Image (cartoon, rainbow, N blue to C red):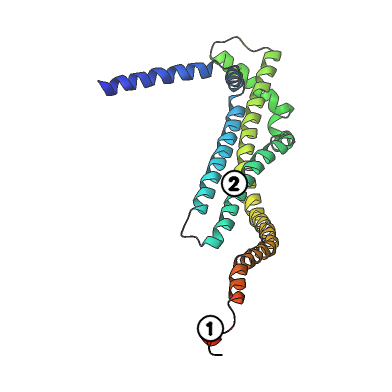
Amino acid sequence: MAISSIGSKFGEYTAKGIGKFAENKTVKNLCEKFKKEPIKYAGYATLASLATKDAVGCYLYVTQSLNNKKIPEDKRRFVANMDLTNGILNVVTQIGLTFGLKKFYKPMFNKILNKSFNKQACKELITAYRKDAKASGDAILRKLEAEKKLQNTKDTIYSAFEATMNIVVATIVAKRCIVPFISTPLTQYFTNKHDKKLNAKKPEENAKNVEIKQQETAPAQQTEVSYSGSSNLLSKFKK
């Protein structure tokens, strides 16, 4: 009974939480956009999930590398820096390239599918729409209605093309081509820069350590000088 009551309470609170989340204005706007252009925004959702996965994975990999005792201690920082650089570059390049190359998608689409939407192809598609409407018993589409349906078809195909290009750019171009090429040099550069700062601080730290040691040993040296001389206590009585 206790387990079932806990389960029912959990379900009740979860349902309330989801209900409040669904009533949020931002969520409602996103839902409306998904309804109007489901393919396009499904592509954006895929991109967001990829970037989130890489961000979480970056944190886990860096933490694991810093605490991995199998890696020599002097190499752990370099490995952790490599993981951190990879994670940051994966997120930045995927999002940056996707939106940076977005303006080129439309010309690419028109060039690749130009033949599929020329005048002759559009006439054939409109004819096909009218035949389908007649076969199904619906009213035959007028010219404007047929052209609107044609444009909707074209927009749907373009949304699928854009979503596909987003995934290709994010997973292949950014993650598999660009990031591996620049991550190692960048990691080495920042590691060397950090090492130079550490080496620049070492002389100052060494000088301070020497000064502290001299101050600590100074009283002992004075004590030794104050008792220097003959160690024979009876020598002054021999005269």
Taking the image as shown, residue 194 lies to the left or right of residue 61, namely right
Task: List x then y, in percent, for residue 88.
Answer: 62, 45
Judged from this view, the residue extending furthest toward the top is 139
The quarter in which the C terminus is drawn is: bottom right
Q: Which residue is mark 2?
A: 87
Disc assigned to residue 37? none
Location of residue 154 by image quarter: top right
Task: List x then y, in percent, for residue 215.
Answer: 64, 65
Taking the image as shown, residue 134 lies to the left or right of residue 116, namely left
Q: Is residue 101 visible?
A: no
Residue located 65% across and 20% down the image? 127
Residue mark closest to the camera, 1 vs 2: 1
Of the two numbered discs 1 and 2 on the same chain, state the one appearing first in sequence: 2
| Disc 1 secondary structure class | loop
| Disc 2 secondary structure class | helix
The residue type indicated by label 1 comes to: Ser
Q: Within 10 angstroms of label 2, few (less than 14), some, or many (20 or more) residues?
A: many
Q: Which residue is mark 1?
A: 231
How many marks on residues?
2
Location of residue 1 by image quarter: top left
Judged from this view, the residue extending furthest toward the bottom is 239
Marks 1 and 2 in Cβ contact (< 8 Å) = no
Residue located 60% across and 18% down the image? 32
Work out how far the residue at label 1 is from the one at label 2, CA to CA, in angstroms.
Answer: 72 Å
